[in-house]
Amino acid sequence: MSAIQLSALTKYFGDTQVINSLDLGIGDGELAVFVGPSGCGKSTTLRMIAGLEDPSSGEIWMGNERIDTLPPAKRGIAMVFQSYALYPHCTVRGNLGFALKHAGMARADIEAKVNAVADVLDLTSLMKRYPKELSGGQRQRVAIGRALVREPEVFLFDEPLSNLDAALRVKMRVEILKLHRRLKRTMVYVTHDQVEAMTLADKIVVFNAGSIEQVGKPLDLYAKPANKFVAGFIGSPAMNFFSSGAGALLCPTAAEAANSECGVRPEHLEIRLDGAGLSGCIEVFEHLGNEAFAHVRVGTDLFVVRVNASAQYDYDQPVVLRASPENLHRFSTTTGQRID
Ligand code: ADP
């Protein structure tokens, strides 16, 4: 059993509290993604699970065992970092086998394990190369391989793809998904990139300022964000926010929208040249090839609207926006919590 349970987990650096009494369960075999803006405590939480940082208070459990009191090497956890941290003077084979050699494993056993991992990660043809002879993606695969050979119960990834270019990031994301499907091990993955979170996670954990804002499946978070922070963080382009006054014009049947802040996603806005609705004008029009985004100025508000790739609008062209009531999100103006 390698389910992970954090309970009242708290961390201070000096007098500053950076993790505020977290409670979180990650299921056996689940791929959980910690996402949130830079500095919100994702890495610190991951490092506490790994044993690289001591909690100030609270507990960490793996299955039926309390692990926060164990040294890192006894936790059955392997971590993959953003900086690959490969040994430059060792070949790929040497890097993959390093930990096993260090642990005193017999040479033939090391050979067998390293070959098996190289096969999984498509590194077999690169075994004699040194890190400087590898591309960024290949280095990251070796770094993952070094974690794999140790056959850990739990894998932790700390922004492992941040140093790669955009195309390679997408490719490696798919590799990590395939790896997770094959190994069926518990994985915790830290990223500030909500697209990575949406595409990888069984379960997303949204962090903000040392606390958890929401935990859930990607599409549940997208469809029903618990508060304005999650609503604004998950989704690209971001959700549009506006006052309930504008909401009443945008969506007349949402009369109860009074005294709340409203939000609507770019793909849920309908844009017309005339008729009833919220009147504005085109400020910017962006073509992406497969889709396009109209930025519509309405007084002091700017609405981003996803439109058909074949659409064409002129700058300053008057338009009218509308939305269906079921696509309008409402949040308390005082607490930011979702109102249903
Ligand atoms: P994230 O991974 O979400 O970007 P971190 O967990 O790295 O955030 O950091 C959370 C907060 O703790 C930040 O304000 C950061 O500056 C602070 N912090 C992290 N490590 C240390 C440290 N060793 N000493 C003091 N403050 C730290």
Image: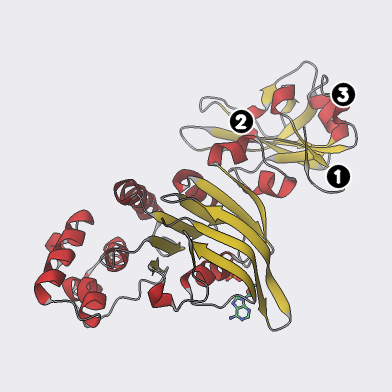
- The amino acid pointed to by label 3 is Ala
Discs 2, 3 touching: Cβ within 8 Å: no
Q: Are marks 1 and 3 in contact (CB under 8 Å)?
A: no
Residue 160 visible in the current orientation = no
Which label number is shown at residue 255? 3
Q: Secondary structure at mark 2?
A: helix
**Callout 2 amino acid:** Glu
Name the residue that disc number 2 marks: 267
The amino acid sitting under disc 1 is Thr
The single residue placed furthest to the front in the displayed view is 64
Q: Which mark is residue 186?
A: none
Q: Residue at x 71, y 20 (%)?
A: 273
Task: Identify the secondary structure beneath mark 1.
Answer: loop
In this rendering, the label closer to the viewer, 2 or 3 = 3
Query: Callout 2: few (<14), some (14-19), or many (20+) C-alpha neighbours within 10 Å?
Result: some
Who's the residue at 69% across and 63% down the image?
209
Q: Is residue 300 left or right of residue 132?
A: right
Mark 2 to mark 1 CA distance (whole Å) = 24 Å
Q: Position of residue 222 (x, y in %)?
A: 60, 38
For the residue pair 284 and 15, the one nearer the viewer reads as 15
The residue nearer to you, when weighing 153 against 224, is: 153
Q: Residue furthest right?
A: 259
Ligand 1, image quadrant it occupies: bottom right
Residue that badge 1 annotates: 333
Is 275 positioned to the left or the right of 35 in the image?
Answer: right
Alpha-carbon neighbours of circle 3 within 10 Å: few (<14), some, or many (≥20)?
Answer: few
List x then y, in percent, for residue 321: 73, 26
